[in-house]
Amino acid sequence: MSSEKDRADERIDSLHKMTSSVPGWLERNEGETLYRLARFKAPIPTIVELGSWKGKSTCWLASAVKDRGEGKVHAVDLWSWKPSGKPLEHPDEVFDEFVGNLQKFDLESYVEPIRMKTVDASRKWRRRSPIGLLFIDASHRYTAVREDFEYWSPMVATGGYIAFHDVNTWQGPTKLVSELPKWYVKVKTKGLWVCRKVLEEP
């Protein structure tokens, strides 16, 4: 009889194969980290993702919520960007592909898209529930990463987690994680830079 660890490993293998068809820059070990945090570690099954693009990381997170049996992924993005820098053929081009990827894997009901700037979305969030896992992967400019952290981190529950993408490869998130206040403690993971909020903010 397989152990829980074996079953989780098998599930992660299947998710890696599933998400390989979704465009994006998330490595397998990074997807695994998001999955394990959202499914097993987050004290509250409320997940917020800042920067979703076509949904590669969203699919990992939504699969974790689905397997956990509770919760929701709140995906915040404008869906208005192409890596080529070329204009969109129509305003919903990227958003439609994002939704299509969720539908393809039967994950749409586990995700709430929030189509607005990340800071604007944070102002509307304040009436909602505390966050168990916050994934920061929107603009990588330092000022933007700092704004995302400052506006969203107060809503992360004590014991909750914040994951940052592209630390050590992009200057913005790399600088930001070197400045975190003392109530965040780095957590060792496979890929991504993750910290846990261990104290209430003063």
Image: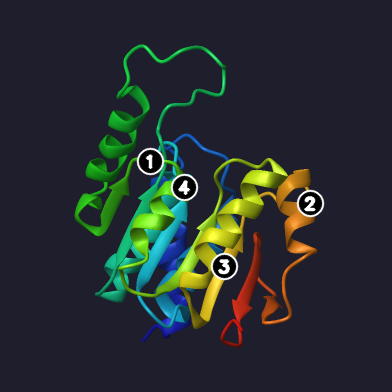
Q: Residue at x 56, y 49 (%)?
A: 137
Look at the picture and state if 2 lies above or below 109.
Answer: below
Question: How would you rate the neighbour count of disc 2 (Cα within 10 Å): few for under 14, some for 14-19, many for 20 or more?
Answer: few
Image quadrant in which the C terminus is located: bottom right
Image point 68% across, 45% down: which residue? 143
Q: Residue at x 43, y 83 (%)?
A: 43
Please name the residue shown 79% across and 51% down the image. 168
Disc with the residue nearer the chain's start (4 vs 3): 4
For residue 168, the mark is 2
The residue singled out by tag 1 in the image is: 116
- Which numbered mark, 4 or 2, is in the foreground of this view? 4
In the displayed structure, does residue 187 sit left or right of residue 42? right
Q: Amino acid at mark 4?
A: Thr
Q: Which residue is mark 4?
A: 118
Disc 1 from disc 2: Cα separation: 28 Å
**Colour mapping used in the image:** rainbow
Q: Residues within 10 Å of mark 3 (few under 14, many from 20)?
A: many
Q: Is residue 10 left or right of residue 69?
A: right
**Counting residues from the N terminus, which is met first, the one under dot 1 or under dot 2?**
1
Q: Nearer the viewer, residue 26 or 152?
A: 152
| Residue type at numbered disc 2 | Asn
Q: Nearer the viewer, residue 166 or 143?
A: 143
Q: Is residue 142 above or below residue 157?
A: above
**Distance in Å between CA atoms under marks 4 and 2:** 23 Å
